[in-house]
Image (cartoon, helix red, strand yellow):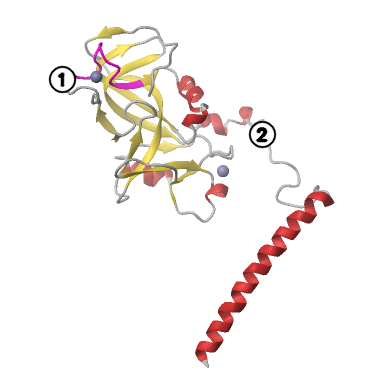
Amino acid sequence: MSRPSSWSIGRHRPRAEAPLTGYKIAYPMISADARRAGFNGVALGRTQVYGGVADAVCIQSPRHRPPSSWCDCGFYCFHDLDDARDLACDPQYQHCVLLEIAASGRFVRYELGLRYARQTIRSVRLGRCGCGRAATALADGGPGVVGWRRLHPVCGLCAGPRPVLTPEAFGVLCGHVPVRGDEAVDDPAAAVFAPLDGVGGDGDLDEGTLVPLLTAEVALLQARLDQVQSRLEQLTHRSE
Ligand SMILES: [Zn+2]
Ligand SMILES: [Zn+2]
């Protein structure tokens, strides 16, 4: 994760005595053979995918161990879940999930978070589908990296007939990490969005909206009927 510019200079400490809790965002990934799942960082180390437990590696130099004071290597996390949620609103990080992690080993402490050597993922929160509803599954998404495909958190409606990975199945492939929805998405107090009246039924749609909608539906039906008709003809001819 990139270090936000508002982070102050860190104080270097040799090691964490006990694991420290942190929060971050990452892209969920699945291996090309669909046997493993993991995460891709959002800025540094974008070519690497890490699993449930991982040690940071420096892509600039193999001669030091992350987190080096002279380098920006290492894993990054925030102290607060809300800071990770805020970062997930940035358009370039759409389709990320929220990770709760335990940081261990050497670390550098900043005002907003940590840069550290070893990471254990404690849980994954799926957050929102691109349509704004709570995401309930993971579907094949955008660009991947060599050996890994990127997944997008989706709701049931947007997933449609696409095959999806359930949160449980994804968690198992990550090494038995709990995966769930984000309580901030489900929170009724935050539910200021509601479906528009008339969507899903035609009760409140005026004629100007309804006519093009119906015309489009009729055109679709007609195309489907033509398909069925030609298929029937093929079958009839074959059996003659
Ligand atoms: Zn480094
Ligand atoms: Zn959706």
Question: At 43% from the left edge and 16% from the top edge, which residue is drawn?
Answer: 4
The percent coordinates of residue 235 (x first, y second) are: 53, 84
- Label the magenta part by its dominant secondary structure: loop
Task: Tell me the quadrant of ligand 2.
Answer: top right
Mark 1 is surrounded, within 10 Å at the Cα level, by few (under 14), some (14 to 19) or many (20 or more) other residues, namely: few
In magenta, the rendered stretch is 65-76
The percent coordinates of residue 206 (x first, y second) are: 83, 49
The percent coordinates of residue 131 (x first, y second) are: 58, 40
Q: Which residue is mark 2?
A: 193
Does residue 68 appear to the left or right of 131 in the view shown? left
Mark 2 is surrounded, within 10 Å at the Cα level, by few (under 14), some (14 to 19) or many (20 or more) other residues, namely: few
Q: Secondary structure at mark 2?
A: loop
Q: Nearer the viewer, mark 1 or mark 2?
A: 1
Tell me: residue 22, above or below residue 139. Answer: above
Upstream in sequence: badge 1 or badge 2: 1
Per the model, the C-alpha gap separating discs 1 and 2 is 52 Å
Residue type highlighted by circle 2: Phe
Question: At 28% from the left edge and 19% from the top edge, which residue is drawn?
Answer: 116
Q: Which residue is mark 1?
A: 63
Tell me how many marks there are. 2
Q: Secondary structure at mark 1?
A: loop
